[in-house]
Amino acid sequence: MSATSPAEPLLRALRYLYRLPMLAWHVLVHLPGVMVLMVRGGAPAHAAIRWWARGLLRVFGMRVERQGTPLAGGTLFVANHISWIDIIALHSQHMMGFIAKSEIRGWPLVGWLTAQAETIFLRRGNADSLGQVMGEMRERLRAGRAVAAFPEGGTRDGTALGVFHARIFTAAVEADAPVQPVALCYGTGCEAQPIVAFAPRESFMANFVRLLGEPARPARVCFLEPILHTEHAGRRGIAHTARERVAQAMAAA
């Protein structure tokens, strides 16, 4: 049933009615146990994060479908960026450290959770911070740890795929690490991308609440053919190929 149906407001209210208790249970009951495992670290923590992320997606009515297999070890994962929920979708399948703005570190609870989830914090507009982030990415990749980035540089409106900026691929080239593109597709045939995306001037909380009332839909995470920097002419060639593979996967969905 479409969102313009006269019955949609009632259906949305009913979804809130049963999803809000699910959300409360997932946060208040499940999360504390996950937090304990996160403090301990290692494989149990990674498994707990994947489990919790899949559960959160279910709360939002999203049925995760995975295609392909994420590479093990030091890999740079790059994906199209629609919304905050992209991070949850990726974490539901594989543990990887994301790059996030440094302000998040100071948020109550959320800051601690993101830090424990191996996030790399970036101070926007600070050249020194960017250099430190690139260095941290390089060292993690060399140490065999996965890192994830959104090379479009920010969220999009869901109607088109943005340019993949080449600089983010420098760490993979310097660390001699593979790059694995990931296509994130919401809804059958990716038709729900504009719905999941942030509306103009929509805050995180407003988007969170709106998505909580949306109809159930699939969330497809497609791990595509990896790219080795030796196969391309530097980071620009990798960026072009990664974007091309993501675009092709979305078109074929």
Image (cartoon, rainbow, N blue to C red):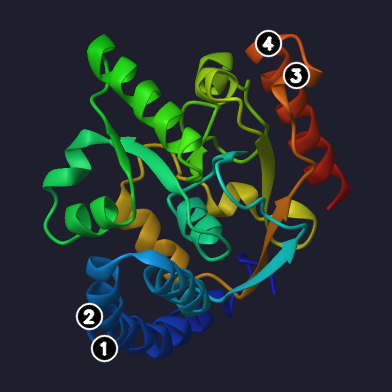
Residue 110 coordinates in the image, percent (x, y):
21, 57
**Which residue is identified by label 4?**
234
Q: What element carries label 1?
A: helix
Q: Which amino acid does label 3 sit on?
A: Thr
The residue depicted at 52 percent of the width and 78 percent of the height is: 58
Direction from residue 132 to residue 231 in the image, left or right: right
Q: Nearer the viewer, mark 3 or mark 1?
A: 3
Give the CA separation, mark 4 to mark 3.
8 Å
Q: Which of marks 4 and 3 is in front?
A: 3
Residue 3 coordinates in the image, percent (x, y):
61, 66
**Which residue is identified by label 1?**
29
Assess disc 2: are there few (<14), some (14-19) or many (≥20) residues with their C-alpha within 10 Å of its C-alpha. few
The residue depicted at 68 percent of the width and 32 percent of the height is: 160
Direction from residue 144 to residue 21 in the image, left or right: left
40 or 193, nearer to the observer: 40
Q: Nearer the viewer, mark 1 or mark 4?
A: 4
Assess disc 3: are there few (<14), some (14-19) or many (≥20) residues with their C-alpha within 10 Å of its C-alpha. few
Would you say the residues marked 2 and 1 are in contact, meaning their CB atoms lie under 8 Å apart?
yes
Assess disc 1: are there few (<14), some (14-19) or many (≥20) residues with their C-alpha within 10 Å of its C-alpha. few
Q: In this view, does 52 lie above or below 147?
A: below
Q: Can residue 155 be seen in this view?
A: no
Residue 119 coordinates in the image, percent (x, y):
33, 45
Give the CA separation, mark 2 to mark 1.
6 Å
Quarter of the rendering occupied by the N terminus: bottom right
Give the CA separation, mark 1 to mark 4.
47 Å
Would you say the residues marked 4 and 3 are in contact, meaning their CB atoms lie under 8 Å apart?
no
1 or 4: tag closer to the N-terminus = 1
**Which residue is identified by label 3?**
230
**Which residue is identified by label 2?**
32
